[in-house]
Amino acid sequence: MGPMNLGTASVRRIAAGETELVLDAARGSRPRILHWGTVLSETRDDELLLLSSRPWAHGGPDVAIPASFSNELGAGLAGPTGLLAHRDGRHWATCLTVESVEQDAPHRVRVVCSDPRAAVRVIYNLDIDTDSQVLSATSTLENTGDDDLAVDWCAALCLPLDSRLRTLRSFTGRWAGEFQPQDVPIFRGSFVRENRRGRTSHDSFPALIARADNTAEQSGPAAAFQLAWSGNHRLRVDGHNDGRTFVQMGELLLPGEMLLAPGERYTTPALIAAHSDAGLSHVSQRFHAHALRHAGGGRLHRKPRPVHYNTWEAVYFDHGEARLLELVDQAAAIGAERFVLDDGWFGSRRDETRGLGDWWVASERYPNGLDPIAQRLREHGMEFGLWFEPEMVNPDSDLFRAHPDWVLGVDALVQVPSRHQYVLDLTRPEVVDHLYERIAAIVEQYDVDYIKWDMNRDLHHPASDGHAAVHGQTRAVYGLMARLRERFPELEMESCASGGGRADFGVLRHADRVWLSDNNDAGDRQQIQRGASYVLPLAITGTHVGPRECHITRRVYSMAYRSATAIFGHMGLELDLSEETDADLDTLRRAIALHKRHRELIHGGRHVRLDTPDYLVAFGVVAQGAQSALFSCAKVAGHATTLPTELRLAGLEPQRHYRLRLIWPDDYAPITAPSLVETADLLGNGSVFSGEALMRHGIPLPLMHPDSCLVFHLAGTDTTSA
Ligand code: DGJ
């Protein structure tokens, strides 16, 4: 018997660059994914169909049940479904078949499915970004029936996972300790992360990375997934006992939160997925490209990211015109380009307990308003940034006294106190209008260039009028940001939530920067920034030079180390400059100048993490085209050997030659000499090495003190001799 003759008209391919998604979407059948990954350019549709067939197995149903986009319960699949909806307890066993397929571009497709018995339609939008090659998937569930449809769970897509990818990395953390990777083997059963904090959260960042046993930073297969959403979420990876594994991500809906009236629709947040056959750094690069393209509505490339000065750790709530003017002058003198006036400039805000919500300038602190500060900033050619926490209110505030009913809360439950503040109910249009008017008035009055948008508590009782409201609240926050952006197209925004509690790709459609962590401890930051780099590009990751003695960990670091750590990101300063020695201020000035010299590369290059022993944190940024690069190597702990390991660089052209120099610390003092620093004149003219030698052989590192960092510069050259 020859092979079965399979009709291939139902096969759809969407592709961009090296990435392809192949679907089988025959009208009247359940749609399924045949392939997602590197383009299969030599493979015919009928081959793929044949190779995607599954045999019958003992102990199961009489026919093999294919997976589909939502693995609905009505199909008879035993594993966790991607869709849970019902009408008062009935019509829950949905089984979706294809109604139509629309493909208006080679990189995207819209698959419309329906189940007439359950009276639902689901529209899947699948799009491979032509730039970053990441797949974006959403599903839109429509109630086509005559009565209400309760939606309990709707994943954006059930994405089959390549069976080689056996280890899962998720990201957990806490305030001042964000983006901590944790690895688990993928097993039969379910890995589930549920976030019910009403914001993206510190402890469950909505991203997962899967890799094979032999995958490293620059080699091997890997796939990365994230949910572009700042509210509650559920991430799950289900290993079915038939050997298949699926990734699902979606919004975690609270009881009764999503009730669709006849004709109404619910669209999931987007699942963003990247794959690579060339290692973890490569999947991160794809996420980075996607974020850079879409962050802040795609405006990030318009101008270099200005170096910040942020007032928080310099003054906390101790505001006053004279002091702030002094800080403006100091910040300008050292090279800052944007001055961000943090918490404490408004209402009766003197500490955490009062004034939040009263968005007018505190007159006894600033009797002349903020004009003198704004004017001084303009004189220095600096931008003006202002802190807001729009979604919150202190009970001790004029706003709360006037509108005690404007907060989220459920039934008669007493609110859980958290940083002495309640959450405003942004699902009420009058609340959003009020916030919009207050913020817009201040932005307009002082010609504010930048808003640091903070959000400092979880939502414990997130209900409006008794109904769960995290979905509505999250959409309303996005809506308010979009409305401000529309009114002030040049206004930039930073997303902060007690540091990195809201740094997801959903808020990044509106924000231009994230405040990664309140922890400015350079050693901790090396780790936090490395964790964040799996997802976030350096151009939008806020990195600040903190005080000599870190306020959170009480560790003391050199200015050279603090600066080296902050150079690689959207750089800023957050310290009382008058507490630093002249020598340290000078070091800082030189570090800022170095950052400015190289920021086009730092913010536009390809980010490569290096595989190193745990006592090092090392990575590079390589210019597109690999003609130049910077590499950072921090020593974060001691080592058992007398000398550290060699550093194998990555991302270079093996045949190209590069002039290697050590550019930081610029006053480098050896512990023992000579090392390569002296023998190759790395502080002077440098020496020329092939990309191959630097990547395959590696650089013998000099002895380094713990808590120090070396920055190497590589410039492509036609010279091949040292
Ligand atoms: C938390 C933020 O993460 C800090 O940077 C600072 O803005 C404070 N809030 C102000 O209250």
Image: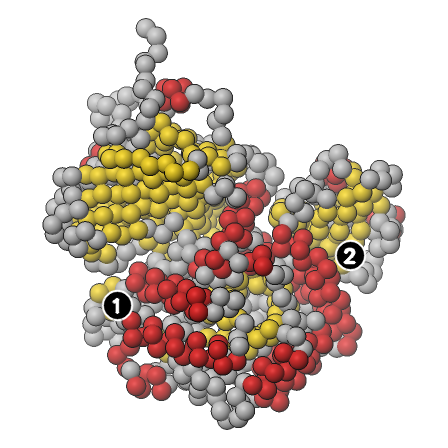
Query: Horizontally, is 654 left or right of 512 in the view?
Result: right
Query: Horizontally, is 687 left or right of 132 in the view?
Result: right
- Look at mark 1 in the image and give the residue it sits on: 463
Residue 108 location, quadrant: top left
With respect to residue 446, does 492 lie above or below?
above
Q: Nearer the viewer, residue 418 or 541?
A: 541
Residue 82 location, quadrant: top left
Query: Horizontally, is 408 left or right of 199 in the view?
Result: left
Residue at image coords 48%, 78%: 444
- Sequence-wise first label, 1 or 2: 1
**Callout 1 secondary element:** strand
What's under tag 1, amino acid-wise? Answer: Ala
With respect to residue 166, does 714 lie above or below?
below
Q: Residues within 10 Å of mark 2 (few under 14, many from 20)?
A: some
**Callout 2 secondary element:** strand
Question: Which percent across, then down, holds residue 504?
Answer: 45, 56
Query: Horizontally, is 91 left or right of 681 in the view?
Result: left
Q: Quadrant of the N terminus?
A: top left
- Look at mark 2 in the image and give the residue it sits on: 663
Question: Which percent across, then down, holds residue 486?
Answer: 43, 66
Residue at image coords 52%, 67%: 490
With respect to residue 207, does 243 lie above or below?
above
Q: Nearer the viewer, residue 129 or 691?
A: 129
